[in-house]
Image (tube, rainbow, N blue to C red):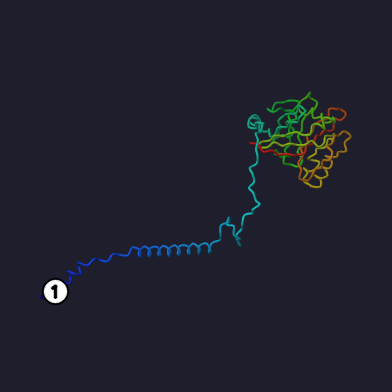
Amino acid sequence: MSFEETNNDIESSQDSKPKKKPNRLLLALLGFAFLVVLGGAIGYWVNLQSISEPPPVDDPRPQYGVPRPNANTTSQPEPVKVDNPIDFGALQAINPDVHAWLQVPGTYIDYPVCQSLQDETFYLDHDLEGNYYGPGTLYTELMNSRTFSDPVTLIYGHAGYPDIMFTTLHYFNDTEFFNTHEYFTIYIPGHILTYKVVSAYVYDARHILNTHGLFLDKKVLAEYYNYVVNPDSMSKNIRDGVTLKPDDRIVQLSTCMENLMLSGNRYIVTGLLVDDQLTY
């Protein structure tokens, strides 16, 4: 036999042997090991990130140098609003000087309040539409804010006309009426202001705001507040136990005397602001 025949027989015998198959178990183990290593690497990276950044504010763990929200702090509820029964849009379409509406229970006082930008005394003898009218219209002066935010606000109105304007304000001169009618209400755009009647008395003819320098001096205001709850008038009704603090706000309803012998004096009913209800 020749060398080439011998070599061919050897190669033929080698080709006839079965080929070795790959070990699937080994491959699965290698794959699992790779996933374990990859997962560890990812976890390590995430841990590094958490170390380099502060924990979120809702994290229960102690935090240093990171402000935490006060556990006792609660969000403030939205203020409750109610409907305003006075249609100021309609009123101001008739007359833009209208800025409030006054109601005094037990009396016939249920009127708009005006403030002229040109003439302080215009509404002494003019109606809501600007026509001449003897009984006039309730009004405030320019030295008072239309929002009733001043320490002392004066509303003026005539008396002496049967049951209109401030004629029935004199009901408060009766002690029983005074004791049983404690409140009056002022409506303004966006607010319903409730006042507690603290006193009603005869006062002299002085202009209150001018005489007291618009109450810019706190000492003057304190002295006047003390007088309001304890006036030296011979004709007065006062609410027992009431004191006025420096940050209180009062409204004084001022009218003339029906008694001609006292025509130079004023009759004043004072209300202390006790509630401010927001409206739509």
List the residue tagged with mark 1: 6
Judge whether 1 appears above or below 280 on screen. Answer: below
Q: Residues within 10 Å of mark 1 (few under 14, many from 20)?
A: few
* 97 sits to left or right of 50: right
Judge whether 51 appears above or below 144 on screen. Answer: below
Closest to the observer, 31 or 12:
12
- What residue is shown at x 71% (from left), y 30% (from top)? 112
Closest to the observer, 113 or 264:
113
Image location of residue 121, percent across then percent down:
74, 33
Q: How many marks on residues?
A: 1
Q: Examine the image and state in which quarter residue 163 appears.
A: top right
Which quadrant is home to the C terminus? top right
Which quadrant is home to the N terminus? bottom left
* 27 sits to left or right of 200: left
Amino acid on which disc 1 is placed: Thr
Closest to the observer, 99 or 33:
33
Q: Examine the image and state in which quarter residue 275 appears.
A: top right
- What residue is shown at x 87% (from left), y 36% (from top)? 233
Q: Examine the image and state in which quarter residue 211 appears.
A: top right
Q: Residue furthest top?
A: 162
